[in-house]
Amino acid sequence: MAIKPRILLYSHDTYGLGHLRRSLAVAQQLAQDIPDLHQLLITGSMVAGAFGLPPRLDMVKLPALSKRSSGQYKARTLPLTLRQTLRWREQMILQAALNFRPHLLLVDKVAGGVHGELLPTLRHLRTWSPETQIVLGMRDIEDSPAATRAEWHTNGTHQLLEQVYDAILLYGERRLFDPVTAYGMSSQAADKLIECGYLRRGAHPRPREAVRRELDVTDRPLVVITVGGGGDGYPILRTALQMIAEHRPGFHSLLVTGPLMPQGKRGLLRRMAQGQDVTLLEFTPDLPSYVHAADLVVSMAGYNTVCELLSLGKRAVLIPRDRVRAEQRIRAGQLAQQGLAQVLLPTQLTPAQLLRAIQEGLASPPPRVTVSLDGLERASQAIQERLERPSRPHPLPKPTINGHARLPAVAIHKELFA
């Protein structure tokens, strides 16, 4: 491009680290592939600054939301109602678009944003900047087909995919899980779907031998037990420490709590780990290096973790999250069917069962990975092609939330939506 392209990335980040890490991985690939690219990431993550950032990328930090076990959202730390927090986030997102003037908006997962917070920005871009490309990045699985169809119907997602978005990047393979049939996507939306494959992760970790020397496990198996952001990972790590205390296995365990685990639960785990053959970390941005050094990994079945395990060809025991969404359970089941992982459901989680799964995994050969891991390169190529092909004006459907008409909440910009 003759001009320096600008890409705005939206990553709502209300629970865990998955959306942020996926967005940063794509941004890193784009920075590598597109000279003079400038990127602005809008995120609600509390730990966004802990990760290495691509060159020429800046961030807008939104007031954080958190998700209860029921799936309901709330302000994470501020003394504000959910409505007040969403109004503030809406204003910040719209202001970012107005000032940054992106050539392309890349939205992670949620087409309309959390509770529709992205709708005013979509309306502005489609009305006043129709040449801006609007692209959705969709992970391999959203939720069960029934739950996703109901959610998309309520949030008007089908209309957004058909009438607002220019392209939909699928970070997965349709032969494993086809969102077109599972979620009832129209032919108009399906025509925009670009199958990218899974996003390769952990490509440049530290040498395996160096990490194992650091942990003093040069002559023993190393088992890494990680629970992503850690917001709901305490039962897994507690069970792992009980297993170590009761059975004294002959391997060394590295436990990573994640930065979002409550401090009180982290303290309980630290006390349980005292005197045991374990290393306990709260957070590391270099987790791929530890996964690379491991003989086996125990983890939940989040998208980014699974991509790292596949990329590094690791033996794995997956304990999928079973609340709020069925996404992890479905993904874990698919990988088990492909011979790429063992699955231990949360209802089966006991110290003895966990030890048995780990021992079986250590005795098995490394998996033969057959899924496509070219997602970053293909997504980058698709985005470059969109940047070279200006969009045409679209009629924007009336923004709705929970099935009801909803006007933009940014009063100071009413003239933009008249």
Image (cartoon, grey):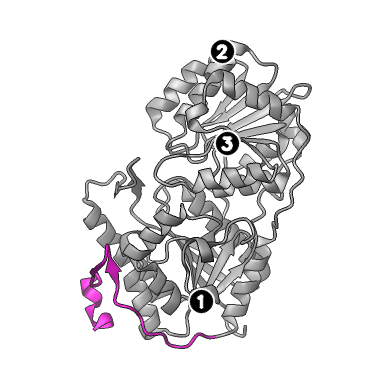
> From what the image shows, is residue 253 above or below residue 33?
above
Magenta segment, prevailing SS (helix, strand or loop):
loop
Disc 1 versus disc 2: distance between alpha carbons? 56 Å
Question: Is any part of residue 387 visible from this angle?
Answer: yes
Does the segment drawn in magenta span residue 308?
no
Look at the numbered discs 1 and 2 and tell me whether their residues touch, using CB distance below 8 Å.
Answer: no
Residue located beneath label 2 in the image = 245
The answer to whether residue 344 is left or right of residue 235 is: right
Indicate the quadrant containing the C terminus: top left, top right, bottom left or bottom right.
bottom left
Residue at 39% across, 44% down: 324
The answer to whether residue 395 is left or right of residue 288 is: left
Disc 3 versus disc 1: distance between alpha carbons? 37 Å
Q: Answer with the quarter of the image where residue 411 lies.
A: bottom left
Does the segment drawn in magenta span residue 415?
yes
> From what the image shows, is residue 285 above or below residue 164?
above
The answer to whether residue 61 is left or right of residue 215 is: left
The answer to whether residue 115 is left or right of residue 136 is: left
Look at the numbered discs 3 and 1 and tell me whether their residues touch, using CB distance below 8 Å.
Answer: no
Look at the numbered discs 3 and 2 and tell me whether their residues touch, using CB distance below 8 Å.
Answer: no
Mark toward the start of the polypeptide (3 vs 1): 1
Q: Position of residue 301 (x, y in %)?
A: 55, 42
Question: Residue 187's mark?
Answer: 1
Q: Of the residues shown, which amino acid type is indicated by label 2?
A: Ala
Q: Position of residue 255 (x, y in %)?
A: 57, 28
Question: Residue 299's mark?
Answer: 3
Q: Of the residues shown, which amino acid type is indicated by label 3?
A: Ser
Residue extent of the magenta highlight: 390-418
Mark toward the start of the polypeptide (1 vs 2): 1
Disc 3 versus disc 2: distance between alpha carbons? 20 Å
